Image (cartoon, helix red, strand yellow):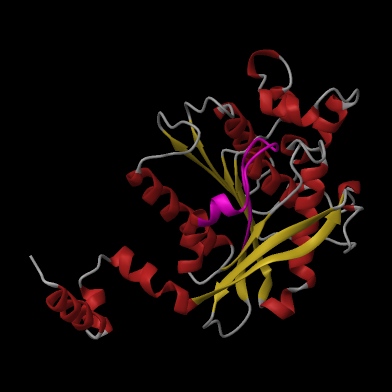
Amino acid sequence: MLNKKSALLLILSLTFLPSQILLAQLSDRASWTATVQNDFRVIPDLTYQQANGVELKIDVYQSRNSDGPAPTFIYYHGGGWVGGSKEANVLRLLPYLEQGWSVVNVQYRLGNVSLAPAAVEDSLCALRWVARNAEEYGFDTNRLVVSGNSAGGHLALTTGMLPVDSDLGRQCIESESPKVAAIVNWYGITDVADLLDGENQKSYAVRWMSSMPDRNEIAARISPLNFINSELPPIITIHGDADPTVPYDHAVQLHSLLDQAEVTNELVTISDGRHGGFPANEMLRIYEQIFQFLDKNVNH
């Protein structure tokens, strides 16, 4: 056993070892995380909108070494529109940061603050904030990609698919939405009404709509399947075929209608996959396909 003097000498010797020797003893993943704070900056809790007395925030993550406007990834968290937080989803952003993207992580009003379609309105406003502040933060407005998981996937789809004359953006400070370059949809809801009644009824969707008498009308206004047209941006969807939370058929229908409209799109199916939590080998395959898709359709 080491005595106090020997232990102190050991600590001092490790402290002053050359950094490259220390990093050589770490895995590739650990080495990257050890140096990431030097490569990236975080600008937290920027207010992009105020609604119902709530200041809505975003976090910006970006490279310290960017030499020009960077492709920008805008992320909406999941949670059935009634739960979740942007902070809980930070690790989902790392693959894009590592690829040199700027990332915007979005907070929006949950159902306990404001019922549907508030989250959709907020998501549109966040996109418009990014465009308005592109010069200050180095966002490339020609390469804006929206993404999210579950309810966040739905918000990414609506943000990228709603027509420019939609009245859902009326509360935003900015009057016009920029064109989205692509959408990365992780098992997002594409038919909201399908989750309100019948065999696919989901409690989170019922809570988000509550007892509003016009809930079916609202559901139609915010269902991505109702906004298919040939002018949509490229869309890649990832969905498990055994998902108990968002029916896999939502992804299948979206893929089929996009094909019919001749919109560039891909459906990445995870065999026996449930609602996220996919195995590591599947995650590697998914991200390989995502970045191939983005390289072909956004970074070309």
Q: Name the quarter where the N terminus is drawn.
A: bottom left
Asked where in the image residue 181 lies, by quadrant, the reply is bottom right
x, y percent for residue 249: 58, 27
Region rendered in magenta = 73-90
x, y percent for residue 116: 81, 36
Asked where in the image residue 78 lies, by quadrant, the reply is top right
Asked where in the image residue 115 lies, by quadrant, the reply is top right
What residue lies at 44% left-to-right and 53% top-to-bottom?
287
Q: As rendered, which of 161 and 134 lies closer to the eye? A: 134
x, y percent for residue 245: 57, 28
Q: Is residue 13 above or below residue 187?
A: below
What residue lies at 71% left-to-right and 23% top-to-bottom?
194
Q: As rendered, which of 42 and 178 lies closer to the eye? A: 42
Q: How many marks?
A: 0
x, y percent for residue 8: 19, 78
What residue lies at 36% left-to-right and 40% top-to-bottom?
279
Identify the residue at the far left of this view: 1
Identify the residue at the far top of this view: 198
Q: Is residue 223 above or below residue 159?
A: above
Q: Is residue 16 above or below residue 51?
A: below
Judge whether residue 85 is colored magenta: yes
In-image side of 41 versus 81 (left or right) = left
Judge whether residue 257 is colored magenta: no
What residue lies at 80% left-to-right and 29% top-to-bottom?
209
Identify the residue at the far front of this view: 4
Q: Name the quarter where the C terminus is drawn.
A: bottom right
In-image side of 28 versus 247 (left or right) = left
Q: As rendered, which of 70 and 204 lies closer to the eye? A: 204
